[in-house]
Amino acid sequence: MFFAKLKSLYPTLTYSETKIADYILANKDETFDMTSQELAALLGISQSTAIRFSQKMGYKSFKNMILDLSRSGEKNDIQEIQLKDSTAATDEKIKNHFSTLIDVTYDTNPPALIDQAVDAIYNASMVFCFGYLATSAMAVHMNWTLAELGIMSIFEENPFALTARFNSCPKDSLLIVFSKSGETQATVSVAKAAREAGIRTLGITNMARNPLQSYLDIWLKTMYSPAKTRFLSYTELSAHLYLIDVLILNLYKKDFSKFKHAVTQYQEIAKPK
């Protein structure tokens, strides 16, 4: 998972952090026994920079990063689909990349953070779901799933119509936003409006620091690559789907009797006559 994370975060690294990344890429086997202090001294940077680099990569400590690095191999590198690939080779590459995306998402969103997000949804009197263009499908899926659980949830694809609702909705409402990059202006504007209206915001977006992140109360992280290829551009939303399932199933467990009753009612209404 180390190299998949690094590929996603590399464009956002500072000069000193890039020195660390480049050294590890060129001397992977030599870093396994290094401490943050030793690596910093070797590269002429501060120890705090080495520790900050490991935290930016999503690890609790420098030691945990080195441990993951020692377990990582070429199989974790993202393999682009080639036009000459057979159907079998294409399918296997997609399967492997999905697995990498889910592993990275699992690793960078600890249980305590998931519990915080679940509590926010459970305690909200009203939930708004928003995504723009490709991620609007994620917002629609989240909205309908919450509605099935009996939660007052609203999807609005028009950012102006959505922000107009904020001033008249209950203050204990929650906004859930989806964004691959965290840089889409429409999504950032919606989150900013929610912040100004005193509404909490849960965001599912890029693990690298981004404009949207500054307006989030809860930040669930996914892998995003600014380098678009015919492979990556069609697979990144799998991590969003994974997090939706994580949130919904943990929410269901939180008050099983209540949500089971709501689902039964929903299915009774929705079943064909």
Image (cartoon, rainbow, N blue to C red):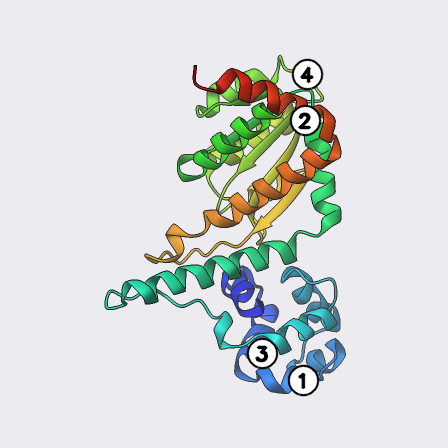
Please give the name of the residue rendered at 44% of the width and 35% of the height, measured from the top-left corner: 137
Amino acid found under the numbered disc labelled 3: Ile
Nearest to the eye among marks 2 and 3: give it.
2
Q: Quadrant of the N terminus?
A: bottom right
Tell me the quarter of the picture where residue 220 sits: top right
Secondary structure type for disc 2: helix
Evaluate if marks 4 and 1 touch, with contact meaning CB atoms under 8 Å apart.
no
Figure check: 148 above or below 74: above
Identified at 49% across, 19% down, the residue is: 270
Q: Amino acid at mark 4?
A: Pro
Tags 4 and 3 touching, CB below 8 Å: no
Residue 259 disc label: 2
Image quarter where the C terminus lies is top left
Q: CA distance from mark 1 to mark 3?
A: 12 Å
The tag earlier along the polypeptide, 2 or 3, is 3
Look at 64% across and 33% down and name the residue there: 201
Circle 4 residue = 170
Return the disc, 1 or 3, that comes first in the chain's sequence: 3
Residue 199 in the image, given as x and y percentages of width and height: 67, 26
Sequence-wise, which precedes: disc 1 or disc 2? 1
The amino acid at mark 1 is: Leu
Mark sitting on residue 42: 1
| Nearer to the camera, 5 or 159 | 5
